Amino acid sequence: MAVSADISRQKRAAAWLSVASNSGAFVLKLTPTVERPAPAAEQVRWLGEGAQFRSMTPVVSAGRVALVMAVRAPAPWSVTVDVGPEWRLDGIVFVPRAARLVVADLIRGGSWDLVDDSMPVHPRSLSTSVSLEATA
């Protein structure tokens, strides 16, 4: 049986990424806005430009979901994400690690803070930038 998601009252976010690594994991972090939401994968859609996405793995934990995908992009890229009314987008993250390792870390639990905000040893080599635009 085919199920189509009702995302007529969707929220949209767009991100432009210029990252130092050309492959890694792309993560959409979501939390429900209702008590019994439809599966997140049925209420979220994304379109990447300049990147190739592979094998989406959902990771479910108490009151939250992460959709983790392997991504490869040889140059800066962008992604537009539409989220249905039963979910809220809590984060769009690129992690320069294999998607399977990110999934394993999320499954183990603990913090879902995937942003490395520590000061790099050589700040000159830091070349990651992200722009985010959200519309309702």
Image (cartoon, rainbow, N blue to C red):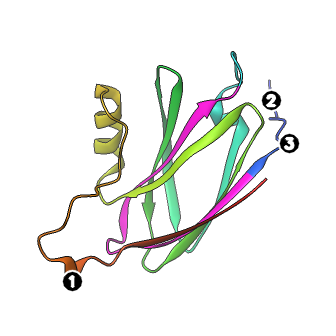
Front in this rendered view, residue 129 or 46 = 129
- Give the amino acid at mark 3: Arg
| Disc number for residue 124 | 1
Reading the chain from its start, which is encountered first: label 2 or label 1?
Answer: 2
Crowding at mark 3 (Cα within 10 Å: few <14, some 14-19, many 20+) = few
Residue displayed at 28% across by 27% down: 108
Reading the chain from its start, which is encountered first: label 2 or label 3?
Answer: 2
- Find the distance from the CA under tag 1 to the CA under tag 3: 43 Å
Q: Which residue is mark 3?
A: 9
Chief SS of the magenta region: strand
**What is the x, y in percent for residue 56?**
51, 44
Residue displayed at 11% across by 70% down: 121
Q: From the image, state whether disc 2 or disc 3 is nearer to you.
A: 3
Mark 2, secondary structure of its residue = loop
Residue displayed at 58% across by 70% down: 78
Q: Is residue 121 left or right of residue 81?
A: left
Which of the image's four quarters has the N terminus? Answer: top right
Q: From the image, state whether disc 2 or disc 1 is nearer to you.
A: 1
Question: In the rendered structure, which segment of residues is drawn in magenta?
Answer: 12-33
Mark 1, secondary structure of its residue = helix
- Give the amino acid at mark 1: Arg
Q: Is residue 8 above or below residue 121?
A: above
Do labels 2 and 3 touch, CB within 8 Å?
no
- Give the amino acid at mark 2: Ala
Q: Which residue is mark 2?
A: 2
